[in-house]
Amino acid sequence: MATGQLFSKTTQALFYNYKQLPVQRMLDFDFLCGRETPSVAGIINPGSEGFQKLFFGQEEIAIPVHSTIEAASAAHPTADVFINFASYRSAAASSMAALKQPTIRVVAIIAEGVPESDTKQLIGYAKANNKVVIGPATVGGIQAGAFKIGDTAGTIDNIIHCKLYRPGSVGFVSKSGGMSNELYNSIARVTDGIYEGIAIGGDVFPGSTLSDHVLRFNNIPQVKMIVVLGELGGRDEYSLVEALRQGKINKPVVAWVSGTCARLFKSEVQFGHAGAKSGGEMESAQAKNQALREAGAVVPTSYEAFEGAIKETFEKLVEEGKTTPVKEVKPPQIPEDLNIAIKSGKVRAPTHIISTISDDRGEEPAYAGVPMSSIVEQGLGVGDVISLLWFKRSLPQYCTRFIEICIMLCADHGPCVSGAHNTIVTARAGKDLVSSLVSGLLTIGPRFGGAVDDAARYFKEAYDKGLTPYEFVESMKKKGIRVPGIGHRIKRGDNRDKRVELLQLFARTNFPSVKYMEYAVEVETYTLSKANNLVLNVDGAIGSLFLDLLAGSGMFTKHEIDEIVEIGYLNGLFVLARSIGLIGHTFDQKRLKQPLYRHPWEDVLYTK
């Protein structure tokens, strides 16, 4: 493996199995280091394609998402690092697929628990094809001031504290990702910082070894000294001992093998990593530390003395003129995410939407402050839900029952009315439910079902002004306006609309006052004297009775009643109700498998 530097300031990676936080941390590190291009060239999410929005400094960027490793590698030929966040179940297969891509040079496997047999196959393939595997069970690695893998080195605050935003003079390799963070901090305190740091992972068979990376560091001119943190278990450290004895490493090596406390236990102890288990005296921390010391490495007497040994070695290099401490630079300020800044109270930002009828921020949604579970537990109905979401208050039971009756009575009026006809024609054209429904709803207006609001508005205005039915009707006539809510194509004075009668009966029985309805009936009496079809229709009945509901409940101010009528609440009832019927017509036509509708010629008057 030897060779030299793995990463640079232009290195780009493909990120497998998207995780927002590690990718954003990589991009924030890029900005901190002054990179011109993001280090993540593409994201691979099996089965998904498109773009993922992230931040590169203050600029929002779109990173391509690919469904396969092959497609991503072809689209981004300069991306030669594969960062694998797959689970242990699929990590081996996806890593092998990446290694087989000619553009991929380094594969980092984050998952723990990858089967050892699979790892051995990956190692064998990588060695045979001159590629590098970092992991499994690794946090990754970092080239200070240039490139980092995933969550390596933790938060931006920690990266700044450890001076990783610019290159230092120390090459560092460890088995542990967590301890790497500790050592980055220690090394930054007593030297000019890390040049490159690698955590090889704690599995029994790591994709690359401590000595692999130490030998690499030895070939990198910018690395002036090497720090190694090993652990008990396995014999990886002995390959480093052998390299030191053979003179393959000509830079100072400061090393420590953790786990010396294992001898305090009477039986063999398994520490955190799969490989951190002593299999005999040679695999003990004490034996490894002694062997490294005898081979020429600087090995302290304890972990507590590790930082001091690193400091002493670095200062000696400076004194001998073998290195000049890197000059400190001030890193740029990473823009803080808005949601974090808001939570911390650092900024205030205007909202874009106002909502007063519902809230989904708690454990369950609430309608006008009433939890959804409470609505169900109290046995409330659709009318109660409408009262909460439309009127923002719990109306009396007779009001909610009236709303439900209106919905039931207006749900459908047969297949021949314009709305149903449009829906049927659309459904028979093979369109989907939403298209068919909307086609019917679009016919609702002044001539079909949309007169409820106008009826309420004109009846209220006339009654409040004290106009007699004669004065009201004649004034509308002079304006050229037909009285909304009056008139029917089929019903007559001697054949009243049953729906109107049911509504009037309910209101007279349950409403505290029906003054607006009685006024509408008086208007009907006058209009019937003119023509037998000028009866009070369902629009007029609902419009006038809704005025009585609003005024008689005592829960609405005059201004609120005027606003409700003006906004179009009452037509909303018709739209809601008729949607039920239109959906039914759609399903009916689909169920009957009706063909495309074509209007018959004989029903068309062709004329010039």
Image (cartoon, rainbow, N blue to C red):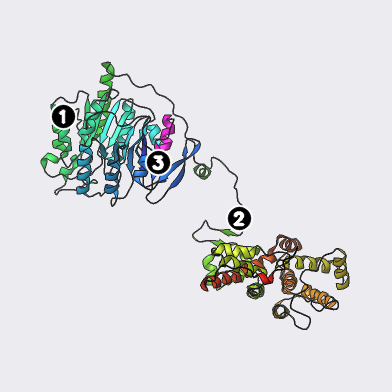
Q: Tell me the amino acid under the disc marked 1.
A: Ala
Q: Relative to residue 532, is residue 123 depicted above or below?
A: above
Q: Which residues are magenta?
A: 22-40
Q: Which mark is residue 355?
A: 2
In terms of sequence position, does the residue under pointer 3 or pointer 2 come before the other? 3
Q: Is residue 433 magenta?
A: no
* Mark 1 residue element: helix
Image quarter (top left, top right, bottom left or bottom right) of the N terminus: top left
Q: Position of residue 187 (x, y in %)?
A: 31, 30
Residue at (57% x, 62% y) in the render: 435
**Image position of 368 (left or right of 530):** left
Q: Are marks 3 and 2 in contact (CB under 8 Å)?
A: no
Looking at marks 1 and 2 on the same chain, the residue that comes earlier in the sequence is marked by 1
Q: Position of residue 312 (x, y in %)?
A: 25, 24
Rendered image: mark on residue 42? 3
Q: Is 27 included in the stretch rendered in magenta?
A: yes
| Residue at 22% in and 50% down | 115
Amino acid type at image mark 2: Ser
- The answer to whether 164 appears left or right of 233 in the picture is right
Residue situated in front as seen by the camera: 12 or 154: 12
- Which part of the image, by quadrant, shows the C terminus? bottom right
Q: Secondary structure at mark 2?
A: loop
Task: Give me the disc on residue 243.
Answer: 1
